[in-house]
Structures are given as structure tokens and as C-alpha cells.
Image (spheres, grey):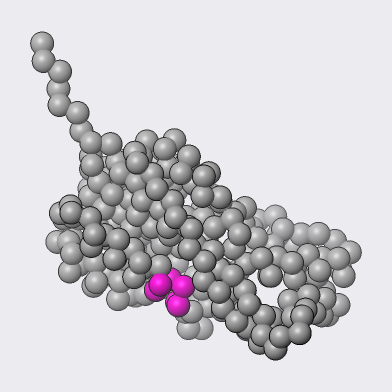
Amino acid sequence: MRRDRAARSGAVLFLHNLAFDEIIDRIADIKHRFNSALVIGAPNEEWADCIAEMTTNVTVIDPGKLFAEAADGIQAVEDELDLEPGSFDVCIAIGTLDTVNDLPGALLRIRFLLRPDSLLIGAISGGNNLPRLRQAMRAADGAMGAASPHAHPRIEPAALAQLLGAAGFSMPVVDVERQQVAYREFAQLVRDLRGMGATNILHSRSRKAITRAGLAAAEAEFQFGPDERTVETFEMLHFAAWSPASRPPKEG
């Protein structure tokens, strides 16, 4: 629903496009021929065309119906993927795995979809994502007299590498990239997050609208300081890992 709302109102893709460009550059540096690609998360329908220049077959899935349709893909949830095992030799996953209900299960399903010696590469939000927003929402909770979860549990680089290894991937690598964006007001950040489909989707979140006092406290905390703009930090974890190579049969 969040991704469909972003698609209808006009998706905000500057972070997604930066992550995609970085991933394409990393793939170009790998001396490996890829023939069949799975793309998980495709808010930009042009990504599939770009990937098609490197492979002979591209399958796109997205948890959002409208993004999936725009990219001629399939609407699917990552931890419920039901595709033919061993169908792909590269999987590119951008911006959705960090909010899936069962991340270990999703990674395991992806590994089964990959052929031996195939690449999983992608980017998700990291553990120190949006620190100013988190401070602002704590201030809002204080003004409203009740705490509520506002952000999905965040993944640290070491934990992501461990999850990749536990799913059976080899040689996991996780890099941290931070993008700083200046905002004149709290509402601008909120609009960007809505355009990214990145607002709160936790089942345990409060269904009550933020009060005027809560919003005022969040705005004051977010814009605290002498500068006209507040610099927010978006942290991305770029990751890559390989499915195990097939082993030759033992003799005798």
C-alpha cells in the first residue's frame, strides 16, 4: 500500500537511483557472465531495460502492485517467493528486504532461486538511518505522553553479513554508504519518505494521528540549531554474496 501510494503521488527515487547506479558499476567490475537476472524492488521501470543490456532474461518483482505493473513485473512478497528454483544467476535487490517480515526466510528463498556460483547484490537501509527523524519522533512521543514504534528494526552491517552466511551464501561483503540531505523543514523529509514508500509499516504502530503538540515537538527537535537547514543522514548497506558453487561428484 505504501509503495502504491508513492507510485500514484510521484515516487521520490534519488536514493534508489544512486543505489542502483552503484550496483550496476559493481556488477560491471565482476568478470562473470550473467544470463538470467531477478530484480527485487523496481520503483523505476527503466532499471529492467538497463539490466537487460547485461543479460538475456530479466524477471522483476515488487511488493507494490503499481511499481510491478509499470516494470512489466510480478507483484510478490520477498519471503513468499514462489518461482522455479535455480532459475537465475544474478539477483539485484534494492530497498525492500529490510522491511520484509522474515528476512532470513527471504534470503534463503533467494538462494534457492539462484544457480550455483551466482550473485546476490543489493542495498538496504542501515542501522544508523535517519537519526534526526528518530530524535524528532522521540520528542513527539514525549509531548503526546506515549511511546510508539516508528521505524522498522534496523540492520547493522555485521548482522547482515551473518544473515547472508546463515542463508548459505558464501563470501558475504557489506559496505556502508551515507548520503546527507539538507531539509528546510520537517515536512519536506516526511514528503520524501512518503514518495519513497518508506513510512511506518509496522503492525504494532499506533493508529492514532499525531497530535498538534506532538507534531510541534517533532518539528522543533528536527530544526533545533542555528542553521536554516537540517542535514539528515540516509545510511545504505551495499551487500554482495555468492551462492555456493556446485561440487563435482565423488569418485568411487
Outermost residue, left side: 252
Q: Residue at 43%, 51% (x, y): give it.
A: 174
Q: Residue at 30%, 76% (x, y): give it.
A: 46
Tell me the magenta residue range: 13-18
Q: Residue at 51%, 49% (x, y): give it.
A: 157
Q: Is residue 91 above or below residue 185?
A: above
Q: Is residue 216 left or right of residue 32?
A: right
Q: Main secondary structure of the magenta part?
A: helix
Q: In this view, does 78 lie to the left or right of 150?
A: left
Q: Which of 167 and 61 is in front in this view?
A: 167
> Percent position (x, y) of residue 182?
60, 81
Q: Is residue 185 above or below residue 51?
A: below
Outermost residue, front side: 226
> Percent position (x, y) of residue 107?
41, 45
Q: Is residue 76 above or below residue 53?
A: above
Residue 74 makes an appearance in the image: no
> Percent position (x, y) of residue 222?
73, 76
Q: Which of 238 and 149 is in front in this view?
A: 238
